[in-house]
Image (cartoon, grey):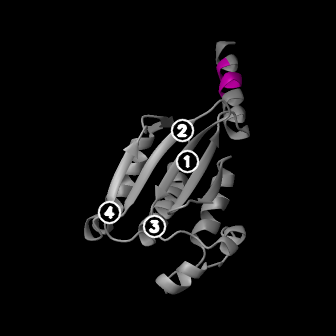
Amino acid sequence: MRRFFYVYKNSIKKHSTIFIKKHIRLELINIDYEIETDLKYIQFIIDQLLSNALKYTDSYGRVSINIMENEKEYVLLITDNGIGIKTEDMPKLFKRTFTGYNGRIENSYSTGLGLYLSQKLANKLGCYITITKLEEGTEAAVHFPKLNEFYTVAKKKEEQHATLQKC
């Protein structure tokens, strides 16, 4: 089990030059949670979402990382006050090789694979990603259901293994 902070720490460190160069303020809110998941997959997902937030946020902007909890799930939020996403691009964000209007204008090196691959990996972990257009900026959310099939299956196998050892 890893604390969310350590997963973020790697992503923040990886992108630290962009934070510094663009003078982007980082806000870490309510991140004292633990996660039990595949570290490489979740690291890729967070890197991608953070990279997008930084890519589309102007100098002196803001990026925040927050975790919220409700009775059904934990939600990791990466929010920025950048240029946002065009409304007509929203339904296509997770399609393979789709590059939105801002990606074509602002960044000629966008491949359109980042969100597609992130959603595929999230689904393998029993999670899913949503992107919300805000009045100013964008909010990317990774939803971790409290009881998903992966966790339930892993828990049952541990219990069965423990039972076998007791015999």
Q: Amino acid at mark 1?
A: Asp
Residue 167 covered by magenta stretch: no
Q: Which residues are magenta?
A: 158-162
Question: Residue 96 vs residue 47: left or right?
Answer: right
Mark 4 or 1: the one toward you: 4
**Residue appearing at x 43%, y 37% in the figure:** 30
Residue in the picture at 55% in, 85% down: 104
Q: How much space separates mark 4 and mark 2, taking CA atoms? A: 23 Å
Q: Residues within 10 Å of mark 2 (few under 14, many from 20)?
A: some
Which residue is identified by label 2?
68
Check disc 4: other Cα within 10 Å, few if <14, some if 14-19, many if 20+: some
For image coordinates 70% across by 19% down, the residue present is 164
User: Spatial distance from mark 2 to mark 1, Cα to Cα?
Assistant: 20 Å
Counting residues from the start of the chain, the first of labels 2 and 3 encountered is 2
Earlier in the chain: of badge 2 and badge 1, it is: 1
Q: Secondary structure at mark 2?
A: strand
Report the amino acid beneath label 3: Gly
Image position, residue 132 (x, y; %)? 61, 58
